[in-house]
Image (tube, rainbow, N blue to C red):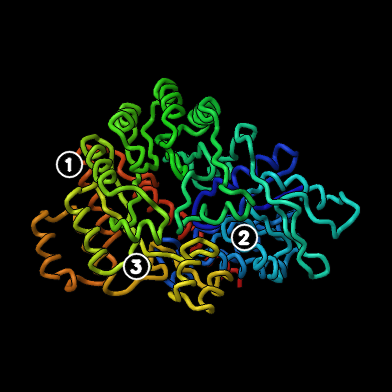
Amino acid sequence: MKVLFIHNGGENMGVEYVSAVLQGLGHDTFLAFDPAIGDNFRFRSEAVKNIFSYDEAIVRRVKQLCPDLICFSVYSDTYQWAKRLAGKLKKECRAPILFGGHHATAVGEEVIKEENVDYVCVGEGEPAISELMDRLAGGGEDPAAPFAANIVFKHNGTPVFPLAVKFVEDLDALPLPDKGLFYREHPAFVRDPYSVVTSRSCIFECSYCHNSYLSRIYGTSRHKKRRRSPANVINELLWAKGEFNIKRVAFFDDLFIHDADWLENFLSQYREKIDLPFFCTVHSRFLTPAMVALLERSKCGSVNLGIQTINERVRAKVLNRFEETGRIKQGVELLGRTAIFVCTNIILGLPEETEAETLETVKFLNACRPDFADSNWLRYYPKTRITEFAAETSLLTPEQVRGIRTGAQSLPYSLGGHTKTSANARIRNLLCLVNFLPRRLVEEIIVRRLYRRLPAFDLRGVCILFNILFQKYFRGKKFPYPHVSSLELLKFNAKYVFRRVKDMTCAYITR
């Protein structure tokens, strides 16, 4: 059978794993890709989106392929795109449509109500895909019988929920992800950097993260943290070096460094057999001198350290985070003595956080000076603890909560989320400028409230670009970000703009 994945924006490792499982079962998998020009995580323009829409190209792909199943992996900010496109595909093709991903997992009971959605995958796709393909092939005697795991469907218009929601217990039992699916679309998705996860879930349950609701979805007191063996991960990276000639590695685990014994074992083999610069996520609780030294000698080029706020009251009460400010300061200082690029994150517009408290975070970052003090807006996602907190404290109305559950708006946290204001935007711009201004000047700007005279339009993109150049060429931090390079991003957009212009020209000529 033929399965078509439809995705937009960039690579998706969940899709790659499910594709690999399907191939192992003897099915053929394909990708229809929308580059999301003018409607992506970093840039929005209605005019650009309409000019460079790839809807027609995807509809043509579906009509040519005639798949037996069409799959969308959606999060809240791509949900409206997926719903619109699913409606167009239903008019041209009888193939059933499945929605999976974070939004479908959180509110599968809402997603299954959509007219053009036939199946919803709640949780991980690997435990459920085999049974679904068997049913599509005609297996099973009772069409109303619930699935054993993870699949919600409709029978005579009524939702039928699975007997259980399961996750993969043994990650080593999974096949290697089907990286070729996205490599064939654009090699930079896979080659530089090569994205990999060594684990699933997290030992923490930060209120703004999907891990804050997964324990309820899976029906466990705490969603189980699982990790691949060091040998299993090394085998994947050895294969990737030979297959794709990869240049860097990005470990996109929710938390990479929590298990010192595992990490020592893994990085020992990594230095010997892979020896490529890499990115990972870190947490102040585990940033000891020994851990930082281990990362540096293993070719760690960049890390992401989530801070979110320096206010311990807000951090504990609102975010369900309990690290001490002193440990955060120590972690930033330890990393700052190395050649590792240190990016910190904060969230602007947190419930109950005042402007004065936000400025305390700015002062902290001005004093510590990570290589880049990044910031994003708070985005309320369905069923996360912070969304429930905001509803309980009347920061969100019932109508707004309903809109979040139904994915009524696309509000990427990089562009505005739910908390962007002109006042917060000026503070964000001050944060972006911290690395370019003397410490004393930043202090004066805060004391005299001169930040209120900064422009409200977003300086983040420009500051990131200059920061990359400065860190790379003047401070010797050669691998500042875990994403494709600016040149590759330019080539990516040029490729799809040219392809779209060519399609429009051909359509005009043939009229």
Nearest the eye: 297 or 160: 160
Give the residue drawn at x 49%, y 69%: 410
- Quadrant where the C terminus is found in the figure: bottom right
Question: Circle 2 is placed at which residue position?
Answer: 104
Q: Do the residues under discs 3 and 2 have CB atoms within 8 angstroms?
A: no
Residue type at mark 1: give it.
Phe
Nearest the eye: 83 or 398: 398
Q: Residues within 10 Å of mark 1 (few under 14, many from 20)?
A: few
Asked if residue 188 can be seen in this view, the reply is no
- Quadrant in the rendering for residue 407: bottom right
Question: Circle 1 is placed at which residue position?
Answer: 474
Asked if residue 175 can be seen in this view, the reply is yes
Judge depth for marks 2 and 1 and give the one in front.
Answer: 2
Give the residue drawn at x 72%, y 67%: 90
Judge depth for marks 3 and 2 and give the one in front.
Answer: 3
Measured Cα–Cα span from mark 2 to mark 1: 45 Å
- Quadrant in the rendering for residue 431: bottom left
Percent x, y of residue 324: 30, 48
- Quadrant in the rendering for residue 503: bottom right
Percent x, y of residue 444: 9, 63
Question: Circle 3 is placed at which residue position?
Answer: 349
Q: Residue 24 carries which label?
A: none
Measured Cα–Cα span from mark 3 to mark 1: 34 Å
Q: How crowded is mark 2: few (under 14 residues within 10 Å), some or many (20 or more)?
A: many
In the rendered image of this protein, does residue 254 appear above or below residue 239? below
Residue type at mark 3: give it.
Gly
In the rendered image of this protein, does residue 104 appear above or below residue 44? above
